[in-house]
Amino acid sequence: MEEIYRSGKYEIPVLYCDNQALVVVKPCNMPVQADSSGDTDLLTAMKEYVGRDTTSPARYIWALCTGWTARSAA
């Protein structure tokens, strides 16, 4: 089942997500990482996507992307 995640002016189809993989379709003209254009980038959008639901198995991907650990939250 495909979910559409909206971030800024982009709609990002999320094809699959679990605690080890996140599969999306990158929209045309969307930067992969932050650049001088200031447009929403895919990496930041996907960090937001997996970080929004703390019960999601994808929270482990979010922790890897952000460097979060249970120890750093204490």
Image (spheres, grey):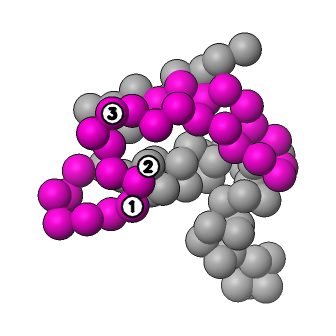
**Closer to the camera, 16 or 57?**
16
SS class, disc 1: loop
- Image x and y of residue 36, in percent: 17, 66
**Closer to the camera, 25 or 60?**
25
Is residue 28 depicted above or below 49 in this figure? above
Q: Earlier in the sequence, mark 3 or mark 1?
A: 3
Residue identified by numbered label 1 = 33
Is residue 49 depicted above or below 9 in this figure? below
Residue 68 visible within the image: yes
Instruction: Say which quadrant the N terminus sits in.
Output: top right
Q: Main secondary structure of the magenta part?
A: loop
Amino acid on which the number 2 mark rests in the picture: Leu
**Residue at 33% across, 51% down:** 31
- Tags 2 and 1 touching, CB below 8 Å: yes
Residue identified by numbered label 3 = 28
Instruction: Say which quadrant the C terminus sits in.
Output: bottom right
10 Å crowding of disc 1: few (<14), some (14-19), many (20+): few
Amino acid on which the number 1 mark rests in the picture: Gln
* Magenta region, residue range: 12-39
Camera-near label (3 vs 1) is 3
**Residue at 77% across, 47% down:** 21
SS class, disc 3: loop
Residue identified by numbered label 2 = 42
